[in-house]
Every structure is written in structure tokens, then in C-alpha cells.
Image (cartoon, helix red, strand yellow):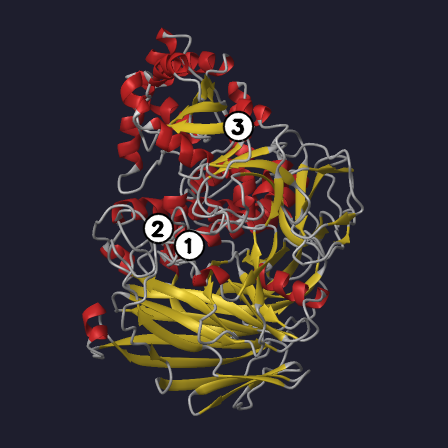
Amino acid sequence: MKTVHLIQHTHWDREWYFTENDSRAVLYYFMADLLQRLEADESLGPFILDGQTVVLKDYFQIAPENRTRVQKLIDDGRLLIGPWYTQTDFLVVGAESITRNLLLGMADCNALGSRMPVGYVPDSFGQSAQLPMFLSQFAIDHAVIWRGWCEHDVANSEFRWRSADGSCVTTAVLPWGYGCAKWLPTDAQDAWQVLPTILQKQARFSTSAQILLPNGNDQSPYEFGVPAMLDALNAQQSEYRFVRSDFSRYFQALADAPLTEFEGELLSPKYMRIHRGIFSTRMDIKLANARLEQFVSQQLEPLLSVVWRLGLPYPQQAVNNIWREAMKSHAHDSIGGCNADRVNAMVKARLTSGQETASQLFELNMKMLAEGITARQQGKKIVVFNPLPHVRDAQVALTLYVPGSDFCIVDENGQPCRWQIVHEAQQDMSVIVQELSNSTTTVWYRKCDILLEAKALPACGYLTLYLRQDIAAGFSAPDDAISALENTWLRLSLDEGCLALIDKRSGKRWDDILRLVDGGDAGDTYNYSPPEDDWRVTSDGALTAAEWQRGTLADTLTLSVSIAAPQDKSARQQHLCNARLDVSMVIALDHQRPLLDVRITVDNKLHDHRLQVEIPTGVRELFHFADQPFGLIRRENRPQMLDLWQQEQWTEAPAALWPMQSMVMMHDRQHGMSVVTEGLREYEIPADKPDVLAITLLRSVGWLGLPNMPWRPGRASGMVLPSPDSQLPGLFHCHFALLPLHQGADSAFWQEIEHWRTPATGWLDSGWSRFKTNPHGHRFPTNFSLLNWQTPLHFSTLKKAQNGEALILRGWNPGAIATDKTFPVTTGGVEEVTLAEAPVFTCPSDVAPCAPVSWRITPAEKGDARA
């Protein structure tokens, strides 16, 4: 006899083709019914609230009077909550976001008394290979998943899933989804007409006599009559024994079953679509999210940690609120951009609002920091902040407002620093400075966006420079003409409109680098779909202007490209170029670094198209590498399952469209090419160009969902609704870098990537401010380092601990081999902790690939500032 575990639940999308306002109104009545049913019949339950505490956070906003009722059901184990704050995406959002999602979800669970100890992931569009690691770090030993699994990955629907760092969780798949047993008849005879088919499908890949029967659906009301119906079936048949259960009881029953092991990601859309197009849908939202994640975790929180150590308050709740609001935009539909236009506007607004709050917190704390520093030179103070835990040289982007033609920047010894102007314009200061806003006289200054050379920046700290106005720079800027970008390592030339890059160390040459390719997109917000006749246009022959500029710190090449292109799907079918795609590309080569920095601006006036930039690698390998949350993953260039998907009638083609956090590379263990991006999340290995990395810049489509696409046959995903905003009209900006590999992915290579991804930040204490604050009375050193961590690990964050007066420092192993573990050097106590910020009792001496390391640092005495 097989045991069938009834899992009663709801799957709660906060937004999709409806808004969060809609779902909150539905939630009020859903919860009112659920509470009444559970309270009226104590035999009912447990009921799972979708594994995300935001459902209760939303509910308590509209029905705070019912908190006690909810609390009692949680205490009695009849309402199961957590462990997540929201049901996050795992392939598009960042590692710190996933960590904070569990951290804040656990905080909510602790406040309410308990948590469901299962990593329940019912609807994420594909499963990260790192999920077992995240769960293990939070002492969660079990996972329940749906999309992305098929028997070609792992033969059975129950298995032991291992991450590259060795973390392992017992995993169960819902092979037919969380809604496979929705809306069951409450009459036993009627239910028996449908249940055997459902149960046979559920048990098809099982190795045990335990079967999961998930009873619930999207925003669907509690099916309170189902348990009694199953009790009746227990008395009428002997093939199955139905039990009122939950995931913990299911895994307990599964404990002795022999399970196979699996390591890797699960991105197979055989039984359910994973929507590979969402990696590039609404790239404006993707970029806004990446910018917010990076800024909060690697700029704002480290700065707040430094000034907290110096004696200023840490606005922890404000930072948590930024994360919580961002996480509301991290669900699979929300961050995927596969929503109604109104919802996408709300998703983007939350991210924009978070960026505004984070930027203002950063601005105010830099202002307070500068206020407490006693100047050692004449001039206005410039505070340069380095979030990385090691000393570094950096070029710092900084905006200055100066009244005259000359200015000088000096260090604390009065020695001139080098800089170069990137962009200059006239600025009406009354728009910026509150004190001038009511003036009858316009005050014009030069607005200078500069690159500033900063040497020996303190680790996790700052130094102070000084701006002197109306004084000559103190160094000579080069004025010679150039016709190539060239430094010790690289040379970029332009020949008949085509770019060629040479690595001078090896002599490797890449032709047609940074070639733009624009093709049609007959898909929707879920999936890219090539038209039947995909007539592509390129940047070949489309160059209209090229400007070379020699600089003090970096040389630049500015290209203007105007591609004759089809306006829309119809014009592309006719091979009619009735519009233009205008693109500006600014390529910079630092005099002291072996990488190309690329900024692209697209004036998007086209519809139904996809724009990619092609990066040749010069490598013919079967595999490539990309980064994933806290790690690196190896992938096939061409998925083998492309040979099977149509024959086996998969729900979607396993196309060679892949997600990345920020980096993809192809190499032969010595030479090759890597691309590091600022928020671009999708790349492709073209079938006809297996040695090319095609980075998706933007994708323009006009429908939320469409049916019958070649790569996704059958019904529409989502709703067949127009989505004109997803065409992304107007200016679009993106930023990435090319870094050739010369000696494989060695430590120098990884450090260049880390320095590009995590820049130092400068702030000018101009004496003007949008907001007035009273003096805080603290005095700070002119240079300060909070700690030093000499490690090849990549910096993830420095933040205040969730609980207690301590800091959390985190890094992760970006490479494919283990590396030595080193302790940070700082005052106070240091102990290793998990992502959950709990003590680690068994500490290996090295750090495995794809593994994070977190340290809890308890200051000896807060405010004990040392230079």
C-alpha cells in the first residue's frame, strides 16, 4: 500500500497580470475564510502559506486585529509559515538577495514562533545548483521543487541534491506541479474518478511508497472538504492510504528510502516551462535591480559599518526595509518582467524607490563622515571610500562643481593627484543647492565628471583628498593624437569600421569584436522566439563617426553607429529597413589594467526585436563557464537535449540561452575571453558560432503571453494581454567589460574582475547640501581602515549583524578549485558563522568552490577609531 501525503496549501502570487493591490484585497477574504475553517474544525490542517512570510506581512497590514488568531494556529502547528520572505527567483537575483530573503524570512518566523523547516520552491523558473548550499547554511535539510527537473537530469523524483561546496539536502520534486490535485471533488465517488490518474503520475518517477498530493493553486481558496473525502476513500479502497500531512512528515517517512545523488542546476523544461526568455525581458528592471543589490550590499552597508564603528548610528531597520521592498520585486513573475505593464511599473518603482533611499543614506553618512574629519590641507575635502577588505589602487568616478577653469586635487601631504575629465557641462547651482534656490541671480558652475586616481586606499575604509579651486592641476595631461587604444597588455584598433583586439602578451587576436546583431523576436515576455525567417541586421558598415581621445588615466574611443533596420515584425518579414537603430559605444582602456570598459547607449525605436553584442573568444571548446550565486558553474555550449525535445514533446526548447550573475567566459584553460557585466543577465552561444559569446543587451516584445511559438508550442504562458511597455522604447544604457584570459583564471584575473565589479566611491564635501543636519560632535581620522582580509575570495558584503552589536563580513570562492581560508585582521573578536549568522562548529581549513564564508566581528569598543 502506498501512503499519500495530503499537502494543503495556497500558491500566492503577489502580482502578475493583477497588481499587489488586487491580491491584497483577495488575501483579506482568503484569510478570513481560512481562519474560520481551521478554528471551526480542529481536525483540519496543517495548511501551508506558500513558504513565504510576506503573505502574513501583507495580511497584518489590512487585518492587524487577527494577529492573535493567526499566532495561535501557528503555535498549534496548523498553519505553517516560512522559511522565505518571498518566493524568490534564483537565477536572476543576486546571492546577497537570496541570503537576505531567508534571513528576513527566518526573522519573521522567529517573531511568530516557528518556521517550516523545508526549502519549499514551488514555482521558480528553474533551480540553481546552489539551492542546497543556501538551505544548508540555514540548517534546512529538505527541499521541495517543481520546474526544471526531468529524468534526464536525475532519474527519480526523490534524490539527494548536492552543491559544489558539499552541502546536501534531501529533495522531492512535484513532477506535475503544486496544482496537480487542485479543486478535488468532495464526494468520495466523484473524487475516485480523477485521483488514480493523478496518483499514478505523481508516483511515476518515485522510488518509495510515499506520494505527495499537493492540494491547492494560485490564490485558490482552502479546500476544507478534501480531508474528510480522503478519510472516506480510506474506508473504501486498499491501494492507497491517505494521511493529512505536511512536508516534514513526508520526509520523515522517506528517511529510509535509498536515494541517488545529483549535483548541478535544473533547467530542463520537459514537463513544465522554465521560460528562458525572462533573463532578458524588461532589461530596464533587471538593471535597476542589479544596481540596487550591488549598491546596498557592497557600498551602503560597508559604509554604514565603517561609520558605525566610528560611533555613528546604524539605520538597520531602514536598510532591512530596502531589502524587503526589493524582495517583493524578486518573485519569479515580478523580476522576470512577465507581468502586465501596470505591474512592471510597480516592480520598477519599488526598485527605484529603494535606490533613492539607499543613495540618500549613503549621501548623508558620507556627509557626516566628512564633517568629523579634521582637514590636513587647504581645500574642500574629498572622501574616497573603499569597500573591499584589502588595500587597492583605484580610479574613482566623481562629480565636481567648480566655479573656474582650473582646479587641483591633492593628498594629505599636498601632492597633486591625477585625474581626467570624462564629461563637462554648465550647471545652474540653484537646482542642486537649497540655499540658492530662492536667489534671483543664477549661479553657473562647471559640472565636471572626472576619473580620479586614488592610490593605496585603506581596506574597508577611506582616505581624504582635497579639492583646491582656481589652482592649476599640478600635472601635465597628454595631448598627443592616437589611432588605437593601447597599453602594456592590450591593443584595440579600428579598420574599415571593424574592431580588432590583440592581447600583446600572447599575440591572440579577436576580429569583429563588439559586433552588434539585431534580430527579430516573435516571442512574449516569457520566451524569446526567433521568427520563422529571422532576417538579422548588424553594425557592419553602419559606423557614422569615430572619435579617439588620449587621457591621463585612460584612452577612449567613441563610436556612433546607425543601423538600417526593420521597424517591426511585419517589416522584418518583408526584409524592409524602414527605421534606424542608433547606438553610441564608448570604449575605454585604462593605462594600468588589462581590460576594455564598454558603455553602450541604444536609442530604441524598433519593435519586436532582440539586440545582442557578439564577443569572439577564439576558443573551440564544448563547455564554458558563468557565475552563479556565490560561485561558478560549467555549462554545455550546446545542450544535448536539443536533439530530444521535439521527439519527447517537451513544453519548451532547452535553448542555449543562459543566465549569469555578471560574468561569462570561454577558455582552453590558458587563453580565452571573459565578459563582466553590470546587470546584464543573459548570454547565448549561437549554434552557428560556437566560439562566440552573444550578450543580450535588450529584448523588445509587445505581449505578456502568446500561444504556439516554435520554441514553446501549445498554450500561451500567462495571459494573452498586450504589453506595449515591454517594447522598451527610448534610451537604454548598459555597461560591461572584456577581460582576455592569458594564464587561465588565475588570481590576477579574478582580482581584476572583483575590482571592476566593486568600484571605490568618492564624495565631495562641497559645503552645500540638499538637507541640513546638526553637528554630530564626533571626530574621525583622515584615513581609516576597519579591517584587513588578505584573501582570494571575492567580497560579498560587510553589514551589521541581524542580531547583536556585531558586524558580518562575507566573501565567496569565485573559482573552480578550493582556496585557503584566512581570517580577517581587526580589533575585537572574530568567529565564523553561517549565512544564517549562526556559529560554525566544524570549520574546514579551506574554502570549497561555490562556497561563501561569513565572519561575525564583535568590536572591542565601538567608536575606538584608529587610522
Nearer to us: label 1 or label 3:
3
Q: Nearer the viewer, mark 2 or mark 3?
A: 3
* Label 1 to label 3: alpha-carbon separation: 43 Å
- Residue 231 is at least partly visible in this image: yes
Q: Position of residue 450 (x, y in %)?
A: 52, 69
- Amino acid marked by disc 1: Lys
* Alpha-carbon span between mark 1 and mark 2: 8 Å
Circles 1 and 2 in contact, beta carbons < 8 Å: yes
Judge whether 583 appears above or below 178 on screen: below
Q: Which mark is residue 726?
A: none
Query: Is 194 located above or below residue 721 in the figure?
Result: above
Label 2 packing within 10 angstroms: few (<14), some (14-19), many (20+): many
| Quadrant assignment, res 457 | bottom right
Q: State the residue position of label 1.
A: 286
Q: Residue at x 40, y 55 (%)?
A: 276
User: Relative to 306, is 94 on the left or the right?
Assistant: left
Question: Quick one: SS at disc 1?
Answer: helix
Label 2 sits on what residue type?
A: Gly
Amino acid identity at mark 3:
Ala
- Tell me where residue 225 sits by quadrant: top left
Most distant residue in the front direction: 238
Q: Which residue corresponds to the image point at 42% horizontal and 26% vertical from the top-left?
A: 49
Residue drawn at (26%, 39%), measured in percent from left and top? 18
Which mark is first along the chain, 3 or 1?
3
* Lower sequence index among marks 1 and 2: 1
Residue 209 badge: 3
Q: Mark 1: few, some, or many residues within 10 Å (few <14, many ≥20)? A: many
How far across and down, in percent of the image, does residue 183 sit?
A: 29, 26
Q: Nearer the viewer, residue 747 or 755?
A: 747
Instruction: Residue under label 2, please give it.
Output: 337
Q: Secondary structure at mark 3?
A: loop
